[in-house]
Image (tube, helix red, strand yellow):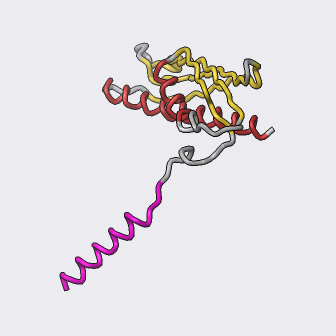
Amino acid sequence: MNNILIKAIILFLFVGITGCSYKPIFSEKNYGFEIEEVILVGEKRINRIIYNKLNFIKNKNDKGVRKFTVEIKSEKVKKIVSKDSKGDPLKFEMNISVNYQILSNGNVLLRNDIEKSNIYNNETDQFKLGQSEDIILENLTDNISDILISSIINLNDN
């Protein structure tokens, strides 16, 4: 009985591991364009997240494709939304704004502003608050990166 159970578990694990073909969304698709340069100004952490997403499609070295330069300016603002009776903050709002322009051969093809925000509760533990803010920052920036990449794809389709 144990022998059959062990074989079933091994078979299940083998099928589960080999059957899953995980691939990042932007890693192997041919978009028909190349991002040859990314110019970043502003908040370093936001810029790093956006750059890492754009880097998947940055250097494909295909000949005959349109080449774009992306200029990005990012900013993060954290403000207190509400306070308790003592004046201590209860809720914060994190607002991330990204201004970008897409250039081809020195000509501006698209200029856009994206702004995302999130309201979250204060934590008594500052470490937990920092972790929550890090997660919120990554999620908002990922969302902005996806919008930016979609606009480049739509621009290339035209």
Which is more toward the observer, 157 or 76? Answer: 157
Q: Quick check: 101 above or below 35?
A: above
Magenta stretch holds residue 138: no
What residue is at 19 percent from the left and 82 percent from the top? Answer: 3
Judged from this view, the residue extending furthest toward the front is 63
User: Which residue appears farthest toward the left when viewing the image?
Assistant: 2
**Residue in the picture at 56% in, 22% down:** 95
Position of the C terminus by quadrant = top right
Where residue 28 appears, x then y in whole percent? 56, 48
The quadrant in which residue 130 appears is top left
The range drawn in magenta is: 1-22
| Magenta-span inclusion, residue 13 | yes
Residue depicted at x 71% and y 37%: 64
Q: Position of residue 7 (x, y in %)?
A: 26, 78
**Residue 16, how many percent across, how many down?**
39, 67
Task: Tell me: 55 left or right of 67.
Answer: left
Q: Quadrant of the N terminus?
A: bottom left
Tell me where residue 60 appears, x and y as whole percent: 58, 38
Main SS, magenta residues:
helix
Residue furthest out toward the bottom: 1
Residue in the picture at 63% in, 20% down: 71
Above or below: residue 141 compared with residue 17: above
Front-most of 146 and 67? Answer: 67
Between 57 and 142, the residue placed more toward the observer is 57
| 154 to the left or right of 136 | right
In the picture provided, is 62 more to the left or to the right than 122? right
Taking 112 as reference, is 41 above or below it? Answer: above
